[in-house]
Image (cartoon, rainbow, N blue to C red):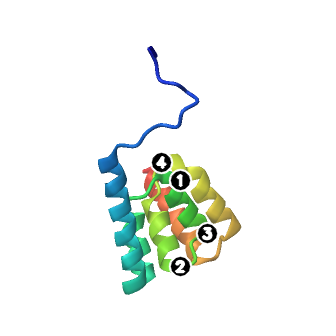
Amino acid sequence: MACCDDPTESPKMDRRELIRLQEQYGELVRDLFTEDPEKVILKLLNHSSAYLTELAALRAHHPSIRLKAIDLLEQSSQPVLRQIAQKEPESAFGLAARARLDALSR
């Protein structure tokens, strides 16, 4: 008899959770095929993790997504904002990063 979970076994996912994730993935793919991908990404950005928001602020292809991501960054992301402000001081992204840093310091 096993008294504990076996760490060598991969964790089992609840079937309902799996179905929910499959539906969510299907909806995302449908939206990307049928809508403006930039709008879909902007919508996803509002619900993404701090890491993904930072990544979007640094490297997103669409300028509107980078600017929105910079605007969404929080206190813990100040190093990322400083990096953007230093690397791109005269660009719209650098200016937005400095403005966000100022807003967070208040």
The residue singled out by tag 3 in the image is 59
The residue shown at (50%, 64%) is 70
The residue singled out by tag 2 in the image is 63
Q: Helix, strand, or loop for circle 4? A: helix
First-in-chain label (4 vs 3): 3
Q: CA distance from mark 3 to mark 2?
A: 9 Å
Whether residue 35 appears in this view of the structure is no
The residue shown at (53%, 79%) is 62
Q: CA distance from mark 2 to mark 4?
A: 22 Å
First-in-chain label (2 vs 4): 2
Residue toward you, 20 or 87: 20
Horizontal arrangement in the rendering, residue 95 relative to residue 41 (left or right): right
The residue singled out by tag 4 in the image is 75
Q: CA distance from mark 1 to mark 2?
A: 18 Å
Q: What residue type is disc 3 on? A: Arg
The residue singled out by tag 1 in the image is 51
